[in-house]
Amino acid sequence: MTDHANDLPEATEHRLEELEHGLFTSDLSVNEFLLVKEAGFHPVGLVMGSSIYHTGIQTRKWSQSQELTKLTEAMYNARELAMNRMEEEAAELGADGVVGVRLDVNYYEWGKDAAEFIAVGTAVKAEDGVSRRNKLGKPFTSDLSGQDFWTLSQTGYAPQGLVMGTCVYHIAHRGLGQTLGTTGQNVELPNFTQALYEARELAMTRMQDESARLGATGVVGVRLEEKSHQWGSHTIEFLALGTAVTKTGEPVTLAKPTTIISLDN
Amino acid sequence: MSVADQSGDARSESFTSGLSVSDFAAVLAMGLEPVGLVQGFCAMQSSSYAVGSLQRNLSPYREARGYVENYQCPHGMVAGEHRMWGQNYEQYWVEETWNQGFASASARMLDEATRLGAVGVMGVVDTQSTLAGAGVTEFHFRGTAVRLAGTDSAPSTPWTTYLSGQRLLKAFEAGFAPVSIVTAVASVRVWAYCITEYLLGGGGISAWSQDASTVEIDQVVRAQSQARALVRASARAQLHGDVLQGVDLIATQHEYEHGDIEIQCLLRGNRARRVGDFVPLRAPDATVRLS
């Protein structure tokens, strides 16, 4: 399977054909479904993309903090492939976007150093027939829930794409001299602080670069995730994820909140 | 260290925000706009987490400062392993480590916000995690810097608050303005003496009291209440006449070995200042969920 258009498996083509005839599937809850409809969209199908990627290894220097660029590229490309395939499925359905996108990484016993990257979401289409695709002509993607999708539409902003930036970073081990030099003291370790700062900043900057390519006004709901995956405690992946948004120029209809007392348990 | 130098410039084209969409909508309703997700870090070595078990076997720890309380066995010498004395003491070095970690990380977050021309930082989240093995604790603060919509004017020091969205909006409506986040830590070590150690074992109630009634473990209760009192005093010292809102106090207890316990209290809150009259909110509507 390559990263080209229409490289979807045969079974996918069959499933999408059924969806094109009016049946829709969705992992939206009932409340989310209602609010997506309220926002002027209807679901056209559950879409997904996946990529099993060999992340390999990269040599690292014991006493030097550094980005592991090969691993960064692997983690980014694998997610990008999964996202692209999900977008392809959405495009096949004529969707304007995908909401509630979840990006997961799974490891299997049979695949040493390999991981499956999966993107799943619900493709939606505008009911007024006006295209809501992003600047690149692709369906927008977003990890917003149905409720958040509706709320965002009320603020006069529209999602453009789920943007991400990643950085796999090796944090240097401390030498014997450094360790002995601070024994018994409670002190800041500037090398560690600086390394983590740099790694997170790289991830966030890359995420922002993606949003700039979409011509976004901003990114909402940014999450910073950290995982060591299978690399040991000194090698960490920093992943920044958020939904890029643009101002639509449509009237802002923010409802005034109502105070309530719930009578439920 | 020029950690703040790494932020800002490369991320000034568009805004980033850690706010949920609901909180983002509330920010707009308040006449504010997000300018960027800001953050600060500090990795601290936290060694000598206790005076040590050896000390516990010798005599009460005498160099402690702050809260110290000694307990004496009422029985006289019973056996070699009998705990003749016990002690509660404040671990000021732990508190200093955490306070320095909090202060450095939050100051760096504030530096980023100042560089972005923000009036404040809302929705602050702080986490503490063990980094690269034991002995190193990382303090991480992050929040969304905001400015007044349509203006570039900003104070020299932006305010910070854990609140965001509707909760912050309600505080404004009630006449309060955020000043800063407040964090405080208290750490108290318990070295149990014979009675405490016996009661902590859970099986000695009837043997000591000749009946099955439950009894209070005085030494641990004292340590718990003192840790809470210390953390509240530390927070109060940061208020300078303002009020503390939305306080969250988390107490954790870690037993290193039988009768050797560390009690740690972490307090988070929002320092706020009254700037206007209280405007009573509309009476709430009673609701029942259909789901």
Image (cartoon, coloured by chain):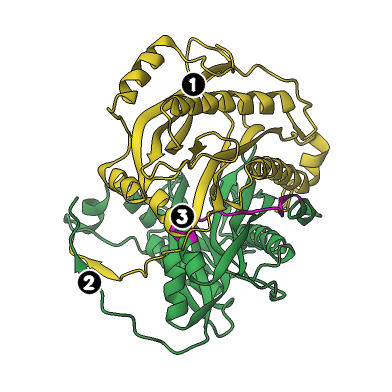
Chain colours: A yellow, B green
Q: On what subunit does the disc labeled 3 rest?
A: B
**Relative to A137, is A183 on the left or the right?**
right
- Whether residue B69 is visible to the viewer of this picture, yes or no, is no
Which residue occupies the foreground of this view, A13 or B37?
A: A13
Residue B22 in the magenta stretch? The answer is: yes
Q: Amino acid at mark 2?
A: Asp
Asked where in the image residue B279 lies, by quadrant, the reply is bottom left
Q: Are marks 3 and 2 on the same chain?
A: yes
Q: Amino acid at mark 3?
A: Val
Q: On what subunit does the disc labeled 1 rest?
A: A
Q: On what subunit does the disc labeled 2 rest?
A: B
**Relative to B191, is B41 on the left or the right?**
right
Residue at 37% over, 50% down: A39
**Neighbour tally class for label 3: few under 14, some 14-19, many 20 plus, Cα within 10 Å:** many
| Label 1 sits on residue | A50
> Residue A189 placed where, x, y %?
74, 48
| Label 3 sits on residue | B21
> Residue B254 placed where, x, y %?
46, 49
Label 3 to label 1: alpha-carbon separation? 27 Å
| Label 2 sits on residue | B285
> Residue A87 placed where, x, y %?
50, 29
Asked where in the image residue B194 lies, by quadrant, the reply is bottom left
Residue A15: numbered disc: none
Asked whether the beta carbons under mark 2 and mark 1 sit within 8 Å of each other, the answer is no
Asked whether the beta carbons under mark 3 and mark 2 sit within 8 Å of each other, the answer is no
Label 2 to label 1: alpha-carbon separation? 47 Å
Which residue occupies the foreground of this view, A30 or A17?
A: A17
The answer to which of marks 3 and 2 sits earlier in the sequence is: 3
**Neighbour tally class for label 2: few under 14, some 14-19, many 20 plus, Cα within 10 Å:** few
Which residue occupies the foreground of this view, B211 or A228?
A: A228
Residue A17 sits above or below residue A185 on the image: above
